[in-house]
Image (spheres, helix red, strand yellow):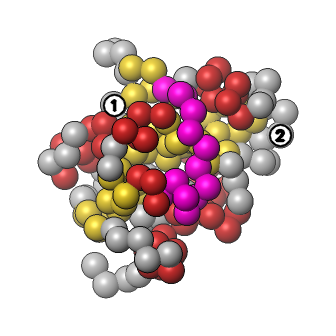
Amino acid sequence: MSTKLNSMRLLEKFNIPYEVTEFPDTERDAEVIAEILGVPAYMVYKTLVIQPVENPKKPLLALIAADRSLDLKALATASGHKKVSMAAHKDAEALTGLKVGGISALALTHKNWPVYLDQPATELEHILVSAGQRGLDLRVPTTAFMRVVNARVAEISTEKREE
């Protein structure tokens, strides 16, 4: 992989070490990606585009582990909104300019959207987050990542229920 993505440039600008991990760019399921990369699912964080119902054009980003489900009520409370909803794939892509599966908080810092990181991440030294392109995740130190994206920590997930 020779192309430098904006997410990598950003980390380098702040002297934050990172490791690029590659997986098939057809894969979008974070749990499967964790399996492919040989890391526990709780280390792979997916970036979700969330729209406040009262102002859908001002989205926020929520990062939760691959093995967790987003708790919309908890996120609404944490973000001070009455109600929030997941953006539809086409809306998420239109708002971010990135493809679903490659949406990255690191690639969107210029938008100054609120970023909410699920509390369990703070117990991990490193997490894997999208690099801003399908098929690429970056392994970053959690505290440095939080600083760069100005993440707010909140309990915004629940255990995934088996369907």
Residue farthest to the right?
A: 54
Q: Is residue 99 left or right of residue 111?
A: left
Task: Tell me, yes or no, if residue 32 can be seen here.
Answer: no
* Residue visible at 25% across and 58% down in the picture: 24
Q: Quadrant of the N terminus?
A: bottom left
* Residue visible at 45% across and 21% down in the picture: 158
What's the distance in space between the residues labelled 2 and 1, CA to CA?
Answer: 29 Å
Q: Disc 1 marks which residue? A: 67
Q: Disc 2 marks which residue? A: 55
Q: Nearer the viewer, residue 127 or 110?
A: 127
Query: As shown in the figure, which amino acid type bears the numbered disc 2?
Result: Asn
In the image, the segment drawn in magenta is 145-157
Q: Nearer the viewer, residue 140 or 158?
A: 140
Q: Is residue 149 magenta?
A: yes
Element assignment for label 2: loop
State the image coordinates of residue 113 (x, y, percent, origin top left). 70, 53
Q: Is residue 110 magenta?
A: no
Element assignment for label 1: loop
Q: Which quadrant would residue 29 be assigned to in this image?
A: top left
Point out the frontmost of discs 2 and 1: 1
Query: As shown in the figure, which amino acid type bears the numbered disc 1?
Result: Asp
